[in-house]
């Protein structure tokens, strides 16, 4: 049986930076993982270096997602970032990406998010907030199944397929 496990990222290595660079430039993932203002933004290459990754580790807790011992994704959270929709202290903003296409649609994201929720709870945080682009129906459905509720929408947030789309902001209270 396939197994999934998560490992905290503590060291910014060239190998991990190269993997993140590949995922951050994957044409399937680019419109899903970062806001873009134009077609040019969608096509702009993102380079992750060990130094830039180390800088991210200062303000983000990052976790690597493994499936059958293969690195397939990453997830992260920040505490009380400026871009929260609801400025409630003690809030974790989370992000997740299943970078390897073969690992998508297998329930790995759901398992990984449950793991991350446990890490956030253990850190003493009581609330999670996230954003999902309106065209990303699979992610929206996953978040809803996991108990996240919509708290607002930001119009004209990201560009994809010739138009601007909303960012749907969601939250979940941890007990």
Image (cartoon, rainbow, N blue to C red):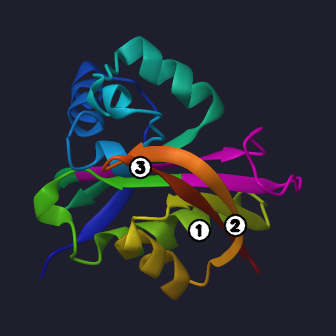
- Residue depicted at x 77% and y 60%: 125
Q: Nearer the viewer, residue 39 or 28?
A: 39
Distance in Å between CA atoms under marks 2 and 3: 37 Å
Determine the image quadrant of residue 1. Answer: bottom left
Q: Is residue 70 visible?
A: yes
Q: Which residue is mark 3?
A: 163
Bin the neighbour count of mark 1 within 10 Å (Cα to Cα): few under 14, some 14-19, many 20 and up: many
- Residue depicted at x 29% and y 78%: 107
Q: Earlier in the sequence, mark 1 or mark 3?
A: 1
Residue bounds of the magenta highlight: 72-94
Q: Quadrant of the C terminus?
A: bottom right
Q: Is residue 63 visible?
A: no
- Residue depicted at x 63% and y 54%: 155
| Residue 143 part of the magenta-drawn span | no
Q: Which residue is mark 1?
A: 117
Q: Earlier in the sequence, mark 2 or mark 3?
A: 2
Please report contact status of discs 2 and 1: CB closer than 8 Å, yes or no: yes
1 or 3: mark nearer the eye? 3
- Residue depicted at x 84% and y 55%: 90
Q: Most extreme residue toward the top, as rendered?
A: 51
Indicate the secondary structure of the residue bearing disc 3: strand
| Residue 88: numbered disc | none
Q: Which residue is mark 2?
A: 121
């Amino acid at each position: 049986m396939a197994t999934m496990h998560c490992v905290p990222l503590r060291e910014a290595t060239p190998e991990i930076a190269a993997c993140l660079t590949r995922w951050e430039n994957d044409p399937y993932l680019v419109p899903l993982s970062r806001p873009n203002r134009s077609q040019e933004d969608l096509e702009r290459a993102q380079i992750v270096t060990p130094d830039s990754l180390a800088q991210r580790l200062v303000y983000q807790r990052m976790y690597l997602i493994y499936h059958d011992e293969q690195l397939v994704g990453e997830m992260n959270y920040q505490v009380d970032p400026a871009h929260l929709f609801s400025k409630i202290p003690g809030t974790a903003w989370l992000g997740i990406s299943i970078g390897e296409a073969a690992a998508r649609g297998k329930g790995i994201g759901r398992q990984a998010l449950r793991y991350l929720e446990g890490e956030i709870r253990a850190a003493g945080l009581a609330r999670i907030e996230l954003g999902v682009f309106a065209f990303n129906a699979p992610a929206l459905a996953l978040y809803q199944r996991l108990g996240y509720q919509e708290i607002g929408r930001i119009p004209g947030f990201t560009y994809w397929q010739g138009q601007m789309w909303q960012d749907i902001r969601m939250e979940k209270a941890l007990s």
